[in-house]
Amino acid sequence: MAQPLQSINLIAPGFKGVNTEDSPIAQDQSFADVADNAVIDKRGRIAARKGIALITSSGASELGTDYIHRIHQFFDDGGNEEVFSATNNKILKGTTTLTDATPAGYTPTGNNWKIVNFNGKAYFFQNNHEPLVYDNANGLRTFGTATGTTTPSYLYGSEAISAYGRLWTVGGSDTQTIYWSDLLIGTDFTGGSSGSINVSKVWPDGADEVVALAAHNNFLLVFGKHSILAYANAFSPATMVLADTVAGVGCIDRNSVQHIGTDVLFLSASGLRSFGRAIQEKSLPISDLSANIKTELIEAIQLLTEPAQSVYSAENSFYLLSFPENNTTYCFDLKGTLENGAYRVTKWVSAPFKSFAVQRDGTLLVGTGSGIGQYTGYSDLTNSYRFRYYSPGLTFGDPSKIKILKKLRPTVVGGDSASVFVKWGYDFSTSYNTKEFGVGNQVPYYYNTSETEFNIAEFTGGVITTRPPINASGNGSVITVGLEADINGFPFSVQEINVLALIGRIV
C-alpha cells in the first residue's frame, strides 16, 4: 500500500522573526532562518518592508561622494519648521532642495551631530566643535556669535538633551561632568540656576565615562559604557540625588538611544536593552531584547568603525538600528515580545538606509547617498530590492528519517506581476533547488464607476492572492524551504507554505 504524504503547514511563516541562536532543527517553525528586507505586518505575516521615495530634487551635489549622516526637524511655537541634515562636513537645510547652512568661516570636521530642539531654538553639538544654535530670526550661528562671549571649552561636547526646562550636555575632553543651562535659556551655562555635576565617584563598577543622556519619568538617566545612573528630582538639578544605579550594562553608542514612550531603548556591548528592564532585573541576568540574534549583532557591533543610527517609529511600531557602513539595518518589531522577552527582528540588507528622523506628522525621513527620502512605497530610489524568507530546518518530527519532498504550495498575497522563486534544500546545504512562478496582474475594479459593468467585473481592493502547486524533488533528513521575490512597486507578504513529503527509512 502506498505510503501517505506527511504535511507541515507553515502558517504565518516567520511570524516570530529571525532566530540565529537556537539549533535550526529544534526551533519553533514560526521562526525564520532568514528574513531579509522584511517586516512583520499588522496581520502577523512576514512581508516586504517599504522602500525609499526620494524627496530631494536639487542640491544633492552638496553631498559629494558622502551620504546623509544625520537628519533633524526643527519647529517652534510660531509654526516655523526646518529640516537640517549633516553630510560631507556641512550642515544642510531643506528636503526637496538642499542648501548649505553652515555658518561662514565655520569648518566642521565630522558629521556626527547631536541636534535638539529647546525653547524655540535648535542646538547642535559635536565632539570638539563649538556648538551652534539656530532660530528662525537669526539663522544658524555659533554659541559665541549668539551670546557675544567666548564659548567655554567644556561645551565642545558630544551629547546633549533638552529636558526639565534646561539644556544638558556632556563630552569633549571631560566625559565625567554634566552641565545644565539656566532655566529656559539654552545658551547660558554660567549664570542663573545653571550648574554641573561630576559623576566620576558614583559609577557602580568603578571607572566609566558618560556616553549618553536621557530623560524618563522625572529622572535624568546617565548612560556610561558599562553602567547606568538614575538621578531623581532632575527638574530641580541643584537638589537632584542619585536614586539608582545599574552595573554591568551600559550604552556604547549615543545614537542608539530612543525613547519609546514607556521605556528607553539603547545599544549595549551585548545587544539591545531597555532601561526599564535593566532597573527591574539588575539583580538578575538582564534580559536581552535582541536575544534571538545575539551573536550576529555582537559581531556587527565589534566591526563598527562609524556610529550606528537608530529611530523609533510609533506609526510603524518598530525600532530601526542601522549600521550605515555595511548597508545593514535591523528592524525590531515593538508590537510585543516573545516568550524569552526578545523582540521579533528582521534584517534589511543591501539597503540605502543611512540615517533617520520622524517628523511631527509621523513621516519617517531617511538619509541616503542621494539626498533625503521618505519611508514609503515599494522601491528603493526607484530600484527593486530582494525579499528573502527561509524556514528553519523541518524534520516532520523525526530528524533520523529520510524525507522525500513531493510538493510545496505557498500562499502569497500581493506582489502584482512579480516573479517569485520557491527554494528548497536538504541537510543544511546552501545549494537550493529553485522553481519560479509568476504573480498575475490584478487591476482593481470599484463599484459604481464608468469603467465597470455590474455583474461582469469583479469588485476587489486590488490585492491578489496566489497559491500555486510546486512539484519538488530530492530527499534528505532535514528540509529547508524558502521564498524570494524582487519587490518593485507593490506590497508582498507570505500567508502560508504547505510542505508535503514522504517519510522514508531511518538514515
Image (cartoon, rainbow, N blue to C red):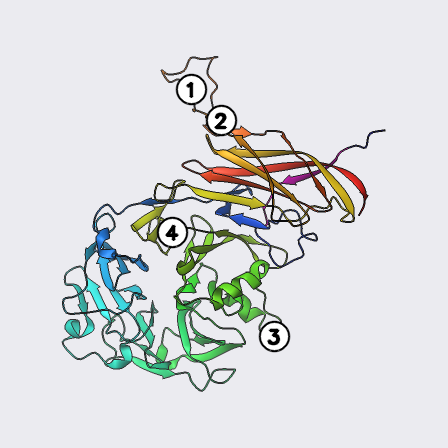
Q: Which residue is mark 4?
A: 352
Q: Residue at x 14, y 60 (%)?
A: 137
Going from N to C along the chain, the mark reached first, 4 or 1, is 4
Q: Which residue is mark 2?
A: 440
Residue pictured at 54% horizontal, 71% vertical? 279
Image quadrant in which you'd find residue 77: bottom left
- Front position among marks 4 and 3: 4
**Mark 4 and mark 3: span between their CA atoms?**
41 Å
Cα–Cα gap, marks 2 and 1: 22 Å
Label 4 or label 3, whichever comes before in sequence order: 3
Q: Count neighbours of disc 4 (C-alpha within 10 A) and say few if under 14, some if 14 to 19, many if 20 or more.
A: many
31 vs 75, nearest the viewer: 31
Disc number lying in front (4 or 1): 4
Graded by Cα atoms within 10 Å as few (under 14), some (14 to 19) or many (20 or more), the crowding at tag 2 reads some
Location of mark 3 (residue): 283
Query: Disc 2 to disc 3, how far (Cα)?
Result: 57 Å
Marked residue nearer the N-terminal end (3 or 1): 3
Instruction: Give the residues in magenta.
Output: 5-16
Rendered location of residue 210, percent (x, y):
41, 77
